[in-house]
Image (cartoon, helix red, strand yellow):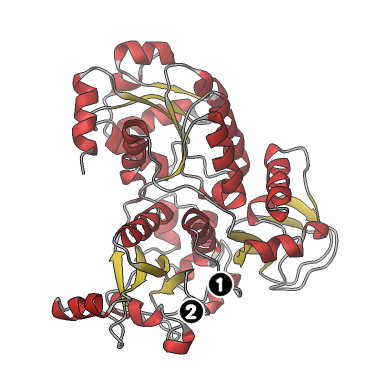
Amino acid sequence: MNLHAKLLERAEQGRPIRVGLIGAGKFGSMFLAQAVSTPGIHVTAVIDLRPGVTREHLVSLGWPLERTAASSIEDAVRSGGTFVGDDALAMIAHDGVELVIECTGHPIVAVDHCLASFAAGKPVVNVTVEADALCGPLLARRAAEAGVLYSLAYGDQPAMACELVDWARTCGLTVIAAGRGHKWHPDYRSSTPDTVWDHWGLGVNRESAAAGGLNPKMFNAFLDGSKPSIECAALANATGLQAPVDGLAYPPGGIDDIATLMRPRAEGGVLEAKGLVETISSIRADGTEIPYNIRPGVWVCVEAESDYAQRSMREYRIVTDPSGRYMSMYRRWHLVGIEVGVSVASIALRGETTGAPRGFNADVVATPKRDLVAGEMLDGEGGYTVFGKLMPAAASLAGGHLPLALAQGIKLVRDVPRDQPLRWSDVVADESVTAYGFRREMERLFASA
């Protein structure tokens, strides 16, 4: 409750938190639009592949033109301005940056940036949740070994759901399930960048998407279920919750239905067991929208185990399941990059993450959208060839399955039918990339644990 007061103290002391951001896309831009006016935070460097375009973009976000004129990070520290460049590793190594925000959205590159930051003794806010789903448990371990923090990004749904889980457990409530909302229909599983705008809704069509510069592959990663699986994997690994054996079920429901849906099947709910992650659909099977849904939000379902707690809920007119034993808490909206400053402040001022992996409970496995044939090249998350399926980590390791984040630009060596999760033996992986070796190391560690 006092992060803002602590930020004001840092500002008054002339000791702002010096932040380096890698990747000025949509998520990064949302943070930058807020950071320019947040006391106690100084973005000393913004790194992007197109520095000239990024400078112009910062002005469009409301930054004064002179703020982007620093000729170096040293100059930015002296002047209070911001250096815009394209060398992420040089920025990470510079003493003028004390905290790194990884915001590229590219999991293979993100692993390199995280490891470089740990080597430089700097904490990381990892916005690239795909990298966390790929190898977050080992990244967190490496950060701890280096004496720094590795954190999920506040504002993104996994960290917001982690906060709700932490709230529930701090109140002495048993967490039955937690997750996010989504617009889901089984037909979306095979969606491609060519079809995403046919289903997305929210007033977006091909013309408005093109005019707004929206990336159809990125948005399709949400629609086809890849992104919900990735974010639920991050949530499971950070909270100790488990993945459903058969992947996400996407039961349809509104906010007041959460407590009834998120019960064990034996009690009338959809869960195979207590203590799972799940995603609730905002539409019914016929495609109609459910009023007061949780599509852009997060939720936790808890159990009140004592008679007294259950009676208290009735007395305060709390919406529960029919038995009065289960209730939910939720946050209907997440503000994405606008809220990342909470992670920055929490790490720098409290020495606390806003969610971080503490085990390897869940994995996201590349799964064909259609029958694939030997010789085809996989095109990764949100593309034409595969989607990401949530799976218990133990099952993924036992089956030798291929993580979604590495199913990009690699070739199939055998035919694989639709919906059969891919295995390492089905592809020729690029063993030269750091993320490949890092993931394989994590698999060995947790297989023997």
Q: Quadrant of residue 179?
A: bottom left
Number of dots carrying numbers: 2
Locate residue 245: give its quadrant: bottom right
Q: Residue at x 72, y 55 (%)?
A: 447
As drawn, which residue projects farthest toward the left? 315
- Which residue corresponds to the image point at 31% horizontal and 45% vertical from the top-left? 339
Mark 2 residue type: Leu
Q: Would residue 366 be seen by someone viewing this image from the given angle?
A: no
Q: Nearer the viewer, residue 210 or 159?
A: 159
Residue that label 1 marks: 244
Whether residue 342 appears in this view of the structure is yes
At label 1, counting other C-alpha atoms closer than 10 Å, the crowd grade (few under 14, some 14-19, many 20 or more) is some
201 or 175, which is in the foreground? 175
Q: Could you say whether the residue bearing mark 1 is in a helix, strand or loop?
A: loop
Q: Nearer the viewer, residue 217 or 235?
A: 235
Residue hosting label 2:
271
The amino acid sitting under disc 1 is: Pro
Of labels 2 and 1, earlier in sequence is 1
Confirm or deny contact between disc 2 and disc 1 (CB under 8 A): yes
- Quarter of the image with the N terminus in it: top left
